[in-house]
Amino acid sequence: MGKKVKHPRQKEVDGILSELLHKKENAIEEKILLLKDFCAHLKKGNHETSFEHCDINIIRDIVTELDRKYNTNYFRDMLGRAVRANFGQWEETCIKALKNESRDFNASLWIYNMRMRFGELTRFDNTQEEQKTQVIKVRLTLDNTSNAVIPGEITDGTK
């Protein structure tokens, strides 16, 4: 058998392949760094949509790709820990305010933030029946000697 002939530009091809492989490894490293930055962003209490580099869907894709590449759940767990730490930040803020440890707590702003994060708790879709209200009338009397209000007759509001 004859000697294997090398392609005249084999060194150039090898160099290009090596460069592409190096770029691919750098891309994986960049994805890991991006995920770490995103997790740090969440741990500070920031919302996932305020991350300037990409949105949560890209982060989820990166997590799936990395977990598949390395056959692990490490990156999914890493993201889960950051999400829980994010919730913990806001929970801690509220608990401090409820214990009156934080004098500058703005309840309206906190409620607005929670609604933006988790949505309205009383959200109804259009297919659901409207809830009917019922009027109840209670006749109250005032005791002049003790200035106490005394409940009296209760009716369903139709009388």
Image: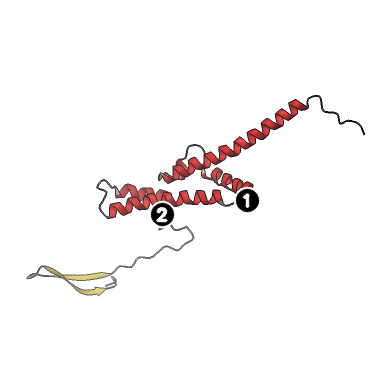
Image height of 73 relative to 32, above or below:
below
Relative to 23, 157 lies left or right:
left
| Local crowd size for mark 1, using a 10 Å CA cut-off: few (<14), some (14–19), many (≥20) | few
**Which residue is label 1 attached to?**
71
- Foreground residue among 45 and 28: 28
Image height of 150 relative to 85, above or below:
below
Residue furthest right in the image: 1
Residue 17: % across, % down: 71, 32
Q: Quadrant of the N terminus?
A: top right
Q: Amino acid at mark 1?
A: Asn
Q: How many marks?
A: 2
**Which residue is label 2 attached to?**
120
| Local crowd size for mark 2, using a 10 Å CA cut-off: few (<14), some (14–19), many (≥20) | few
Relative to 156, 17 lies left or right:
right
Q: Amino acid at mark 2?
A: Glu
Question: What residue is drawn where x is 47% and y is 40%?
Answer: 51
Colour scheme:
secondary structure
Question: What residue is drawn where x is 48% and y is 37%?
Answer: 52
Question: What residue is drawn where x is 64% and y is 33%?
Answer: 22
Q: Disc 1 and disc 2: Cα gap in Å?
A: 38 Å
- Foreground residue among 53 and 128: 53
- Foreground residue among 146 and 95: 95
